[in-house]
């Protein structure tokens, strides 16, 4: 059996061990410490001068805290991109609020500004102004933030950017994670860099980030004894994990280049194949190409479907995956409002994520390409 090729696996840079060893040597084996502070500074200086960061236990925790800080409560409504990972929407339900899902557009596969506005108008006509808007930069491709922010501004609704997949992406040089009132990052094991598990909430508003840190450390009031006037959470990142993150931040620009090189490799390899297409960067958009994704059009491939390709890859011990199944089609979110058509649904039906790790060799990529080309030749 050929060795396993993963969709996206951790890729250490080298200095992670140094930071983790420092944590052990100084006995900072705790959910705070110098690596946590260091990682927060590293991320802030990478993103922008006036950004503040709270390192947390996960991207999901970061989104939960962001919604709490925007005052999302039981009975409120929060607009969320439908095509995404469930972690974008789950924290809305942690607060017993109602998710309102919005379809994608075809340029970036992210939140469609026109359907966003339609959703806001209709929810307001029905008596409720949404409390927040959650666009997602899927697979590293930035959402149309200019249009989304303009609409959010008109109706004065704060934006929480889900930048979990988009660290290193930007629009006209402005980094993803710096557009919204707040943004969340993820350092889960499959993301472009990892702390083995972790996340962060970021904002230009220092006070919001301070409050996030406060809530994440059990909401302990300043007092010699344990005094609490808020419900708190245990959402802080450990100093060990943050040590891994510090090493990873050193190689982030390299990781972006490697992921983008994977995309170019696939694009070049499939350029003569009818029916396989890629999502391109609109002008000024820069994607970290966290995952390379393709659309397979069976009417042009002679009947070969996304699923034929996925199963053929699986037989060769190569992991690939359909695109995210939209939230409005998920059993757990059935019955919540949805604004749009069938864009996300058809992307889900025909889209496939190809192996995209920054640690893949040319030989690995070659195996993927050969397998896909063989299915195309032999038919589905
Ligand atoms: C990974 C991911 C999250 C959640 O991050 P965790 O750190 O795994 O909790 C949220 N949203 C999107 C779009 C993601 O891909």
Image (cartoon, rainbow, N blue to C red):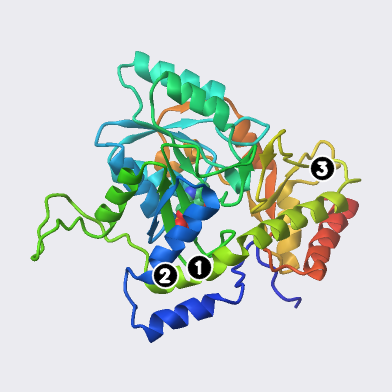
Question: Can residue 186 be seen in this snapshot?
Answer: no
Identify which residue, 225 or 367, lies in the foreground: 225
> CA–CA distance between discs 2 and 1?
7 Å
Determine crowd level at label 1: few under 14, some 14-19, many 20+ residues with C-alpha closer than 10 A: many
Answer yes or no: disc 3 within 8 Å of ligand 1. Answer: no
Position of the N terminus by quadrant = bottom right
Residue identified by numbered label 3: 303
Q: Give the residue at the far bottom of this rendering.
A: 25
Closer to the observer: label 3 or label 1?
A: 1
Question: In x, y percent, where is residue 240?
Answer: 41, 74
Identify which residue, 335 or 73, lies in the foreground: 73
Element under label 3? Answer: loop
> CA–CA distance between discs 2 and 3?
53 Å
Residue identified by numbered label 2: 35
Q: Are marks 2 and 1 in contact (CB under 8 Å)?
A: yes
Identify which residue, 6 or 39, lies in the foreground: 39
Residue identified by numbered label 1: 246
């Amino acid at each position: 059996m050929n060795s396993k090729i993963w969709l996206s696996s951790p890729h250490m840079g080298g200095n992670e061990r140094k930071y983790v060893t420092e944590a052990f040597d100084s006995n900072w084996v705790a959910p705070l410490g110098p690596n946590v502070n260091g990682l927060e500074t590293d991320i802030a200086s990478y993103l922008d001068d006036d950004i503040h960061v709270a390192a947390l236990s996960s991207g999901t925790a970061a989104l939960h805290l962001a919604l709490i800080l925007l005052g999302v409560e039981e009975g409120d409504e929060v607009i969320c991109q439908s095509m995404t990972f469930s972690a974008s929407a789950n924290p809305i339900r942690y607060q017993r609020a109602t998710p309102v899902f919005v379809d994608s557009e075809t340029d970036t596969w992210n939140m469609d500004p026109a359907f966003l506005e339609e959703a806001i108008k209709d929810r307001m006509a029905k008596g409720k102004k949404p409390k927040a808007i959650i666009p997602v930069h899927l697979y590293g491709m930035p959402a149309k933030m200019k249009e989304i922010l303009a609409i959010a501004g008109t109706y004065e609704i704060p934006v929480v950017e889900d930048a979990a997949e988009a660290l290193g992406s930007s629009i006209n040089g402005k980094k993803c994670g710096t557009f919204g009132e707040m943004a969340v990052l993820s350092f889960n094991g499959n993301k472009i860099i990892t702390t083995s598990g972790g996340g962060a909430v970021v904002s230009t508003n220092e006070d919001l980030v301070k409050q996030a840190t406060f809530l994440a450390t059990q909401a302990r009031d300043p007092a010699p004894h344990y005094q609490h006037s808020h419900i708190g959470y245990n959402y802080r990142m450990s100093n060990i994990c943050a040590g891994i993150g510090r090493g990873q931040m050193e190689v982030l620009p390299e990781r972006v280049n490697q992921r983008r090189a994977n995309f170019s490799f696939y694009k070049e390899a499939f350029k003569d194949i009818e029916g396989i297409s890629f999502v391109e960067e609109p002008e000024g958009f820069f994607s970290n190409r966290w995952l390379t994704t393709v659309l397979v059009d069976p009417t042009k491939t002679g009947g070969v479907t996304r699923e034929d390709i996925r199963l053929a890859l699986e037989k060769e011990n190569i992991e690939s995956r359909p695109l995210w199944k939209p939230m409005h089609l998920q059993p757990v979110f059935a019955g919540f409002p949805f604004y749009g058509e069938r864009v996300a649904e058809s992307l889900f039906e025909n889209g496939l994520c190809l192996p995209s790790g920054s640690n893949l060799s040319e030989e690995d990529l070659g195996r993927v390409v050969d397998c896909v080309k063989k299915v195309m030749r032999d038919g589905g």
